[in-house]
Amino acid sequence: MNYNIQLSQDKKAFAMAAALMSISEPWITLKMDKDQCIKAFEGEFKEVYLLHVEAEFAGFIILQTQGSFKGYIQTICIHPSYRGKGFGTKLFEFCEAIILKYSPNIFICVSSFNKEAFKLYNKLGFIKVGELPNFVKQGYTEILLRKTIGPILGYTSK
């Protein structure tokens, strides 16, 4: 299958992506509707990459590119029709190449109940570095994961 990943600032695409989030885990369990999910696309220093397979919207990823946790993968979501086919891994690999240009560390949070996502992130080389109880919603814990090629000090951009 042919696919492409492109940086986007298209508000209509963001609305479509927020709708996808609202019918996917962990947002279903966290009871976040489309209006709450669209807020993930707001704010400074974010890059949104859209995944299209055979010209059809198949998913997206949001990166935080500045600040203490620059290289933070804020959100990733794949359309149900494309899950389990390697497209999440392709998005990660694409973004890893971008992040490693400016940071030796890649971070992501995963909800403690989102076991399938946790398994994928471990397979991709992420390790647990901490827990954030009640971070997104009262009663739920986010697990902070990190993948690294070294410390920040002394890191030179690739």
Image (tube, rainbow, N blue to C red):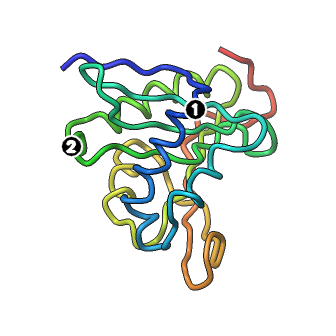
Where residue 22 is drawn, which disc sits there?
Answer: none
Q: Quadrant of residue 84?
A: top left
Q: Is residue 24 above or below residue 158?
A: below
Q: Position of residue 62 (x, y in %)?
A: 57, 39
Q: Residue furthest bottom?
A: 139
Image point (61%, 37%), residue name: 63
User: On the rendered structure, is 64 left or right of 6?
Assistant: right
Q: Position of residue 86 (x, y in %)?
A: 25, 35
Q: Quadrant of the N terminus?
A: top left
Element marked by disc 2:
helix
Q: Is residue 43 above or below residue 156?
A: below
**Count of picture labels:** 2
Q: Which residue is mark 1?
A: 48
Name the amino acid type tagged 1.
Val
User: On the rendered structure, is 28 left or right of 130?
Assistant: left
User: On the rendered structure, is 57 left or right of 31?
Assistant: left
Q: CA distance from mark 2 to mark 1?
A: 21 Å
Image point (59%, 61%), residue name: 36
Q: Residues within 10 Å of mark 1 (few under 14, many from 20)?
A: many
Q: Quadrant of residue 124?
A: top left
Q: Residue furthest front?
A: 12
Q: Is residue 156 above or below residue 77?
A: above
Element marked by disc 1:
strand
Image point (39%, 28%), residue name: 51
Q: Quadrant of the C terminus?
A: top right
Where residue 81 is drawn, which disc sits there?
Answer: 2
Q: Position of residue 66 (x, y in %)?
A: 78, 35
